[in-house]
Amino acid sequence: MNTLIVNGRHVKAREGAMLLEVIREAGVSLPTLCDHAALEPWGGCRLCLVDVTRNEWDGWAKMVVSCMFPAEDGLIVRTDSQRVVETRKVVLDLLLARCPDTPLVQKLARDHGIEQTSYQPNPEPTDCVLCGLCTRVCDHIGVSAIATVNRGAGREVAPPFHEAPPDCIGCLACAEICPTSCIPFTASDSKRTIWGKTFEMVRCTLCGRAFITKEQAAFYDGRNGVPASYFDTCDECKRKAQAKQFSRLSAGAGR
Amino acid sequence: MRIESKAQFDSAVRSAKKAAAGRKLDILVCCGTGCLANGSAKVAEAFAAEVEARGLAASVGLFTKKTGCHGFCERGPLVVLKPSGVLYTKVKPEHVPEILDKTVAKGEIITKLLYKNPATKKPVEQYTEIPFYKNQTRVAMRNIGQVDPTDLEDSLAHGAYAGLARALFHKTPEEVIAEVEVSGLRGRGGAGFITARKWRAARKAAGERKFVLCNGDEGDPGAFKDRSIMEGDPHAVLEGLAIGAYAVGAHEGFIYVRDEYPLAVVHLTLAMEQARQRGLLGKNILGTGFDFDVKLSRGGGAFVCGESSALMRSIEGKTGEPRQKYTHATDRGLFECPTVLNNVETWADVGAILEHGGPWFAAMGTEKSKGTKAFSLVGKVKNTGLIELPMGTTLRHIIYDIGGGILDDRPFKAVQTGGPSGGCLPESHLDSPVDYEKLTEAGSMMGSGGMIVMDDRTCMVDVARYFLSFLVEESCGKCTPCREGLKQLLIIYDDLVAGRGKAGDVARIERLAAGMQLGSLCELGKSAPNPVLSTLRYFREEYQAHIEQKACPAGICRDLTAYEIIPEDCNGCHACFRACPADAITGEPKKAHTIHQGRCIACGACYTACPTDAIRFFPKVALAAAASGQGGAS
Ligand SMILES: Cc1cc2nc3c(=O)[nH]c(=O)nc-3n(C[C@H](O)[C@H](O)[C@H](O)COP(=O)(O)O)c2cc1C
Ligand code: SF4
Ligand code: SF4
Ligand code: FES
């Protein structure tokens, strides 16, 4: 097991862990926006920057994003060095200028002593921090219906050609993973709408509840060995059916 | 015919040289992109047609050759006659019969087509006597302008693949790396990383599959050295790649070229085909058992795609966006395999180093920067174009001896090196030798060798703003500090040039710059503040003038500048009247003219046009002050 020093405290790290995990396990808080346990680290928001050094580096230290830097044995990590704190503040100050009305960003900024941005607040405020979680989760599922478009200052998340995305299956993963909940969608008993596309629902043959879009069912049909009949019933009814079967089995076994 | 042994290679070179010697007279028509734009293709066609019609090939051994860029694009189309070395400039198809009648047939020089030295006002016959060429030392560009880039035989006659032959027949891969190490070669694409060290790391890295890549993205605005090399001597790039592949143990290579370089793509593709046919690429190269082949990969031309990790992603078919990596590409690069990425010019140097030896290359340059370096010299100098010089040449030598001095003999103000990641150096740095360390110490960068010369009519705040406006579009936008930081910097600069600067702006700029340098994901964001910081370092008083006095000392920022005509100095020639795009000038012939402030857009066209220097500029605030002063008095 690797041993590291985080802000002066010795901590142990799981094999293959990144610094961020170790820092948090050590009880040190660090803001992040683009990191998510279910996805590969990405290194875009830059909030998790830390200083790392080693005894043999003679006082030289480098700044790295902790979400992507492997927790190697013997590393000495500081999350509170002056330049780290100052850089993190600049990043938060910039994010607050981009998203002046977004509660999450306001809170992160306030936690770091920033009440108001020192820069020009966005004349067209947005809640999107461009953390890329939505597009990455969509890629991860294997759908890739949305992507970031445009370079530089004009970068945004959008479906192709800003039209209802043909590949979208209406799973709502993007909306659910979004840290600022800024992807609008509507869900009713019979329909779901996201990215300007409306989806028909599949109803559970037992309880009649709408639990999944037709496109989702079609997408998973045959994938990872899932048979089409799997989507005849909703998860809840499946659980109930299973429980019933178990109790029958165990009742039978007891006899 | 494939070349399959050292003896066959030597004999192929001998026969190529013999064929070249049989051409008693060569007419070299520059067909680089610059001269093509000026119509050189028509000139080459006219020569070919006339030579054919007159039967000159057979009777006097005269041939026409379309070559790559001679570098002196500004004077194009260029034509060089060999062996005499006479250079004709601005040649048109209608000059062709005259050149054949006089110069070729009788050895007479056509003076009107010669280059005139602006300093001595005398025409110069030999291209080697022109200061622009005389002061150059060409290694990476050794064959550009000399060879027909579409003809492998011509390149062989000029020494192409001699370095590869020496490597494959006489050296182990380790010895090739040692030779490059002795040469001191460092990367020509930006950071100046030691090439041999990169190669050795990739050689040592575990893995069967390895790659060598050539970075031909060249996204800096105004830079064109890599384009000229790929277009004018594609075999130099292929030879370098093959040598590098042999050294690191790679069998696959990619050349990444931007889509805006169609001629480079055509010439590289042709060169690859020809090299394969002759056994210089592909399986069993030169019969040595070494296999190596190259593919072209075409990029959309984004500046950020020149960044190492973005370039590799782009070749992999993904979005060309940088990726945070804490492993070296030499361990895990393209497709997660050990990869060496070098710049076009770096690869072009490699063949020459293997041919002439590391010590030969290391004999040129400074202690830590060896060899020669290509630059594109542009801006307010008399001679603009593409040049190659030993490292350590002073900026003054480049600007005044090769560049011929500042246009219109105005005062020098600054020289920008290194493109958008570089900085602006003032007069006090003119005598410092150009090498990696010196430029970095001075707050600029070698970068890819762009050099923009600026005269006194340049506002340094505006220059910094220009680079920001380029970068704000070219940043990929993945990481917060670069994307949002550039956006905010540009807002501050827009305010500065419009007279809305406020106290504390400089401090805000410096804080943002530090945040971007430390916080950005890739070198684009980390180096983006360089133009800002270097202008602040050397021209801080100009910032103060913009903020405190609302004045642009160079008279460039239109919102801050007003023009007026000094009546005593005006001879009423009307030149300003004709130059003004806003109809803001009135005046009778031979009488003093007047600028009407209400209509003037402060473009400065009149100032440039006036032959008697009767027009002056001054801070616009003075107008308001004068107006309110008058108001108070009346
Ligand atoms: C934003 C950005 C753009 C770059 N563009 C280029 C380029 O156009 N050509 C190039 O050779 N290197 C470019 N580089 C540098 C490359 O990342 C890399 O360092 C270089 O190609 C390595 O080759 P060298 O060692 O021969 O210089 C760029 C770097 C950055 C950060
Ligand atoms: S929409 Fe939400 S998840 Fe997607 S990039 Fe913006 S903030 Fe991140
Ligand atoms: S520094 Fe700029 S170009 Fe590089 S990853 Fe960040 S946003 Fe993209
Ligand atoms: S969490 Fe590490 S960069 Fe965003």
Image (cartoon, coloured by chain):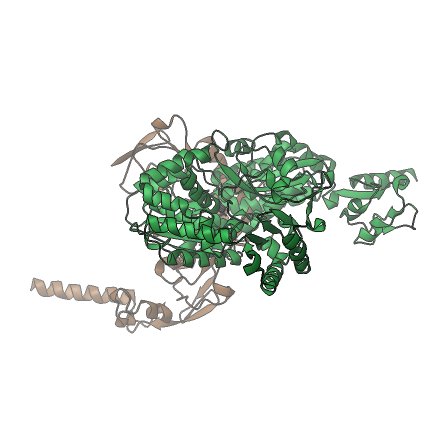
Chain colours: A brown, B green
The answer to whether residue B507 is visible is no
The location of residue A209, given as percent across then percent down, is: 34, 70
A19 or B317, nearer to the observer = B317
The answer to whether residue B289 is visible is yes
The location of residue B196, given as percent across then percent down, is: 39, 38
The location of residue B558, given as percent across then percent down, is: 74, 46
Which residue appears farthest toward the top when viewing the image? A58
B330 or B561, nearer to the observer = B330
- Is A199 on the left-hand or right-hand side of A75? right
Which residue appears farthest toward the front when viewing the image? B59
The location of residue B285, given as percent across then percent down, is: 33, 52
State the residue at coordinates (34%, 49%): B7
Q: Quadrant of residue A141?
A: bottom left
Query: Quarter of the image containing the N terminus of chain A?
Result: top left
A240 or B33, nearer to the observer = B33
Quick check: B365 above or below B281? above
State the residue at coordinates (31%, 46%): B249
Q: Quadrant of residue B614?
A: top right
Query: Quarter of the image containing the C terminus of chain A?
Result: bottom left
Quick check: B361 above or below B35? above
B452 or A106, nearer to the observer = B452
